[in-house]
Image (tube, helix red, strand yellow):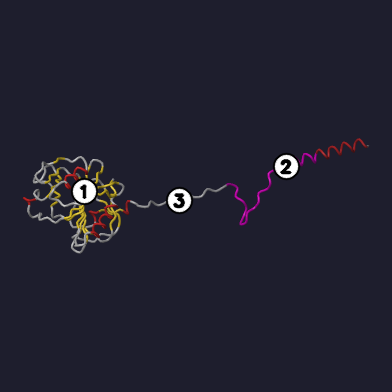
Amino acid sequence: MHSHLRVRAAATMLLAGTLIVAGCSTAPPSTALPGGPASAAPTTAAVTTPEPLVTAAAVMVLEDAGLETPMAAGTYTSRLFEPTLTLELDSSWFRRDAGDARKFNIRRGPNGEEDLTFFSGIDFVQCGDSDVVEAPPDSSTVVDLIIGMPKLNTTQPEEVHVGDLLGTEIRMLGGGDGSLDDFEGYLAHGCVLSFGEVPFPGDSSWLVELDSSEEQLVFVDVDDTVVVIRARHGSGDVEAPWDYMREVIGTVQFG
């Protein structure tokens, strides 16, 4: 009798031990969160792609702006000019002249007396009675020729930012008596930069810098192309227009 009870007691203790072990290996029940039962599986948040800061639609085309029409403020590019570029303009600008792959300009002021003109790819340079220099290898060659012309009154070259590139700025300070109406006197009073197959006075386009010129010139190398950016003012106070033009030139991005 006592033996039978001991067997049953041992069996009971063995069963209790089994239940204790099983209880230790069982994961605790999920705790319900306020607002509803816990999800059976994690959810994945939707991925949102940010909008680009500048879209193609946000860039306006210079040639679409019309002529003698105020241009809206914003980012502009040219459909024709090479190398490709963009620049930031406020609402004070308009176009007067049609451009092409080698040249375009924009104007501001009541009569368009202030302008910003871009020239691409200088082919020839001649200053005074010196020889014609063909296809200058870089902008520094052109700058050296201009500031080395005794007739011309210029500032010393200064490094400026043209977007991500560095350009060289010189200012023509005028004071001479050369005239754009005196075709025969161009070389006697300054330098002629030619854009085309033949140098001045051949059938090409020219940028004429005379001892009477009051202009701001920025030269920048874009790959193998020399780009010239010319600014002209329309009032007696030249410092404010020059500073403003430099700010606009600083927004230019090539490529």
Which callout, 1 or 2, points to the residue nearer the camera?
Answer: 1
Query: Could you tell me what secondary structure mostly forms the magenta stretch?
Result: loop
* Residue 158 rendering spot, x and y as whole percentages: 25, 49
Asked if residue 180 is among those painted magenta in the image, a careful observer would answer no
* Dot label at residue 24: 2
The answer to whether one can see residue 103 in this image is: yes
Which span is picked out in magenta?
A: 15-41
Looking at the figure, which quarter contains the N terminus?
Answer: top right
For badge 2, the amino acid type reads: Cys
The answer to whether one can see residue 117 in this image is: no
Name which residue lies at 74% across and 40% down.
22
* Dot label at residue 48: 3
Name which residue lies at 16% across and 52% down.
153
* Residue 99 rendering spot, x and y as whole percentages: 19, 51
Residue pointed to by mark 1: 228
Q: Are marks 2 and 3 in contact (CB under 8 Å)?
A: no
Chain-order first, disc 3 or disc 1:
3
